[in-house]
Amino acid sequence: MRKYSALLLGSLMMVSTVFTSCEAVKNTSNQQRGVAIGAVGGAVIGGILGNNIGKGGNGALGAVLGGVIGGVAGGVIGTKMDKQAREIETALPGAQVERVGEGIKLTLGENAVRFDTNKSSLTPTAKANLDKLVPVFNQYPDTNIQIYGYTDSTGTPEYNLTLSDQRAASVKAYLSSKGLSSTRFVTTGLGIADPIATNDTPEGRSQNRRVEFAITANEKMIQEAQKEAGK
């Protein structure tokens, strides 16, 4: 996660340098500068991240950053994502909600989505918490949702990869059973990859057993944002 943040910061610094060194910038408004930097920044960041992690690759952070559009259209999408992120935080206070680029990275730890040991079936508590997200997801139908399952390092990497894939699929199946279109979801199991805490302690392993969501604009939202930006 840290290497993506550093890459993003470096890209933004490069874009900022390009624009602040131009004499013409002095005659533009803050809004105009923001849109211009957003347009170029989106291209730079999207291109770099697309080459390194791919759209939807290496977890929720990669999926969100890989789809950066930038410019006015990106700002329109970002405003909608701001609102959705706030509603997710209200609906499920225990969730870790991060607004990244023009999407949302949502992390559900064991306190929100817990699985029994060596099982992929959702516990009653997990179902109850996912139920809280359904109204929000229903309110924003023009988003794609990628679900990533993770485990701690206990057991073989091969076993954990399969288990994490099954757990992500269980989350998709449950949300789909609640009326959300299954076509919105893509699931991936990443097993022991990308730990967010040490696997040397019970507390750290608990944090690593998680489910992440990458919430991004679908093609319809992108097209509508581009039309609005062109007005």
Image: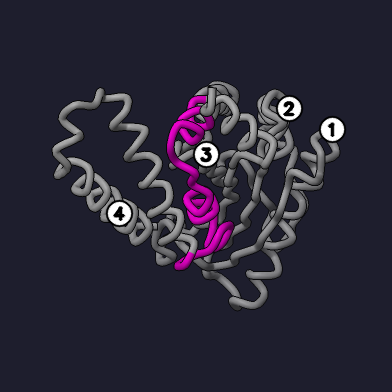
Magenta residues (range): 51-79
> Do the CB atoms of the residues marked 2 and 1 lie less than 8 Å apart?
yes
| Mark 3 neighbour class, 10 Å CA radius: few under 14, some 14 to 19, many 20 or more | many
Quadrant of the rendering where the N terminus is positioned: bottom left
Earlier residue among tags 2 and 1: 2
Earlier residue among tags 3 and 4: 4
* Residue at numbered disc 4: 11
Earlier residue among tags 1 and 4: 4
Earlier residue among tags 4 and 2: 4
* Residue at numbered disc 1: 179
Which numbered mark, 4 or 2, is in the foreground of this view? 4
Using the image, determine if residue 57 lies above or below residue 9.
below
Mark 1 and mark 3: span between their CA atoms? 21 Å
- The amino acid pointed to by label 1 is Gly
Using the image, determine if residue 163 lies above or below residue 29.
below
| Mark 4 neighbour class, 10 Å CA radius: few under 14, some 14 to 19, many 20 or more | some
* Residue at numbered disc 2: 138
